[in-house]
Image (spheres, rainbow, N blue to C red):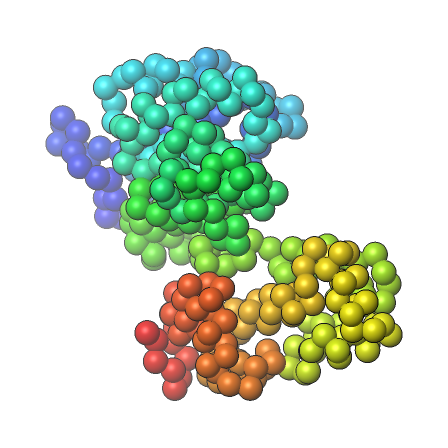
Amino acid sequence: MADMRPGCDDGGMPAPRTIVFVAYQGMQLVELAGPMDVFGFVNALAEDEVYRLVTASPAGRSITADGGLTIAVEHSLHDLAASAEEIDTLLVVGGWITGPVSAEVVRELPALARKSRRVTSVCSGALLLAAAGLLDGYRATTHWGTTDRLARTYPRVTVEPDRIFVHDRNRWTSAGVAAGIDLALALVEDDHGREKAQEIARAFVVFTRRSGGQAQFSAQMRAQPARTPAIRAVQQWLPDHLAGNLAVSTLAARAGMSERHFARAFRAETGTTPATFVEDLRIEAARRLLESTDLTITAIARTVGYRHAETLHRLFTRRLSTTPERYRRHFATGTAPGETAS
């Protein structure tokens, strides 16, 4: 296998990329183990140390992850920050961030970031990066449950709540828990190309690109289930009837309510308007079709309830800052017949 390591050490051999995993009390274990296993698998495939995997905690002592497992840690954050060693990738995992833990980690992050080629986070680890000022002026994401907190507490961060991961210059942030694997695969692709990332994804039985630009979870999961049985029944009915007339008046009639009462109750009980909920479902369905079928953009638009492809084009531009053609080129295995990627 071709050597995938950057640079050379003093002996003329390519030097491994050092990845520092920032761990602390109460962190989520999978947010450490998932990315670490991805990078470790690259080493296994190469039968060499392509990535040097290093763990560090505030005091350099063992930490207890959420769930109770105790993990030995190799270094203290302070010692790593003070050392002359360069870091390829700094990765801050997420977890239950408390005041004292946050302060201990945040204090060392700026010095660590200055010597790192890439600064990354999984889940609520983005809150620690933001607290250290390392996301000011950057686009970022985090677990859906903490996106509001990130945006409210750190207004200089541009929060993108519906992303699995966000790459902005040398900052990479990801959504919650298993999204750390998506992030690690994206970093491997950045280092070694898409083919290598796909090889690892197949071994892990995951998608190579369930990634940036796609929703963290389905539209039905984002909206709360309504308390009123008639409204909840409309929510459950909608995904299978996207091609029909889904005006508020139609949905209200199906629920046996006046249009005004239905719209008011729907928003109060689900946290979103009927029109936004329908739009979310339609764009989600369009994404799936773009990723997995050879249907033309026009056919997809009609399948999800829009008479013209231009309507779908405007929706993608407004909601995803891309076009259906670009989305397909990025996330599907190939461009559909009759379509021109742009």
Give residue 123's position: percent from left, percent from top: 52, 39
Res 254 → quadrant? bottom right
Question: In the picture shown, does residue 204 fall above or below 301?
Answer: above
* Residue 123 shows up from this direction: no
> For the point 14% across and 27% down, which residue is it?
11
Q: Does 37 sit above or below residue 161?
A: above
From the viewer's perspective, is residue 244 above or below residue 229? below
In this rendering, would 254 be left or right of 140? right
* Residue 208, horizontal then vertical, whole percent: 44, 56
Instruction: Evaluate whether residue 134 shows in this view.
Output: yes
Left/right placement of residue 67 relative to residue 117 reads right
Please, is residue 92 above or below residue 63 in the view? below
Report x, y in % for residue 81.
32, 19
> Is 239 on the left or on the right of 178, as rendered?
right
> Which one is nearer the viewer's eye here, 284 or 76?
284
Please give the name of the residue rendered at 50% of the width and 59% of the height, measured from the top-left corner.
Answer: 214
Q: Nearer the viewer, residue 153 or 142?
A: 153
Q: Quadrant of residue 121?
A: top left
Please tell me which residue lies in front, 308 or 198. 308
Task: Tell me the residue at 52%/50% (across/down).
Answer: 161
Quarter of the picture holding the C terminus = bottom left
Please report the residue visible at 55 percent of the width from the left and 86 percent of the height from the top. 307
Q: Nearer the viewer, residue 95 or 169?
A: 169
Q: Count how many numbered circles sit on residues in the image.
A: 0
> x%, y% of residue 322?
41, 66
In the image, taking residue 63 as reference, residue 137 lies left or right, namely: left
> Image quadrant of residue 328?
bottom left
